[in-house]
Amino acid sequence: MSTTSETFVALGAVDPELITPFLAPGQRFVPDPTEEDLATADAAIVRAAFTVDAAMLDRMPALKVVARTGVGTDLVDVAEAGRRGIAVVITPGSNTSAVAEGVFAHLLATVKRLSTLTALVREGRWNQRGGVTVGDLDGATLGIVGFGRIGRRAARIAAAFDMEVRAYDPYADVPAEHRCDSVEELLAASDFVTLHVPLTPENHHLINADRIALMRPGSVLVNCSRGALIDLDAAHKALQDGHLGGLGLDVYHPEPPAHHPVFDHPNTVLTPHLMGFTQRAMALTIQAAVQGAAAVLRGEQPPALATP
């Protein structure tokens, strides 16, 4: 166990109580680092919304490892870190269940029309309840774009609702009974669609007007992955003309987002990129980040590293 004095700093808000139990003797955590703290930091625990670019790395010349609380590295210059010999630790799996549960929170809120029905009761419009169509998950088909940890977890939850599952992922092993050979095939076969893929130049606006047109009338689209995967203008138009029955968004581009007209549609459910940040998930994520960073400082291989 290391007894060398080593400094961990937070880049973004991190609860010290989640960090300190996992520090070794001689290691300290600074939740609100000064420039002096940054200059001598050995490890940085980085929250999702914090940018770590070349300018930020210049302020941390002693840095040996960046530990990202999550798997997305959109705001971390992984290539520049690599050029400086700085490892970038990621924490896959720690919020898998939380995000998958968030997908179903969005689905249920949308399909069961919870916000609309809440307003009816709150505003004393009980006699209008017959005009609201409430749907079902049971017997419907869930299309999952991206069959990694979260996609597979969503499939298991779907089974508990007696849903059919279709999945598309050109890189993952998708069971034959669920497999689709293209996004287009999946969209045409699904009542509800959830996205679980990283953002790349190739899949920017993966769900655009042409692909929304392939979806079943009245289908619901949920995005708890990356905001730029959906063309919101196209989604808004589809909601307005009734082709899209609902839209659930936990992610946006950029974040925080500028107001978009789709936010005002009654069949849109919005959350501020928090579905993966439950109390339990955050504790697991930060624990994994600290332990991964500590492994690097000991000269060991951490469980997961980002690559450029």
Image (tube, rainbow, N blue to C red):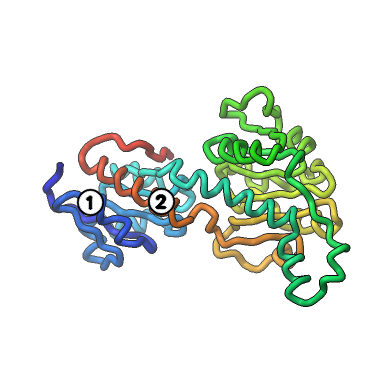
Of the pair 7 and 92, the residue shown nearer to us: 92
* Residue 176: percent from left, percent from top: 66, 22
The residue depicted at 43 percent of the width and 45 percent of the height is: 94
Q: Which residue is at a point 82% across and 45% down the rendered structure image?
A: 213
229 or 152, nearer to the observer? 152
Above or below, 295 against 133 in this view is above
* Quadrant the N terminus occupies: top left
Q: Looking at the image, which is closer to me, 191 or 215?
A: 191
Mark 2 surroundings within 10 Å by alpha-carbon count, few (fewer than 14), some (14 through 19), many (20 or more): many
- Using the image as rendered, state which of residue 96 and residue 74 is in the foreground: 96
Q: Are marks 2 and 1 in contact (CB under 8 Å)?
A: no
Mark sitting on residue 69 = 2
Quarter of the C terminus within the rendering? top left
* Category of crowding for the residue at label 1, using alpha-carbon neighbours closer than 10 angstroms: few (below 14), some (14–19), many (at least 20): some
Residue 159 in the image, given as x and y percentages of width and height: 65, 36
- Labelled disc at residue 3: none
Residue type of the residue flagged with mark 1: Leu
Q: Dividing the picture into quarters, in which one does residue 91 lie?
A: top left
Asked which secondary structure carries label 2, the reply is: loop
Residue occupying the point 62% across, 49% down:
103
Q: Residue furthest bottom?
A: 123
Between circles 2 and 1, the one closer to the viewer is 1
The answer to which image quadrant residue 45 occupies is bottom left
Give how far apart the Cα atoms at labels 2 and 1 are: 16 Å
Against 282, residue 177 (above or below) is: above
Q: Measured from the top left, where is residue 200 in percent x and y?
A: 57, 43
- Mark 1 — residue? 23
Disc 2 marks a residue whose amino acid type is Thr
User: Callout 1: helix, strand or loop?
Assistant: loop
Q: Residue drawn at (67%, 48%), measured in percent from left and top? A: 205
* Dot placed on the residue nearer the N-terminal end, 2 or 1: 1
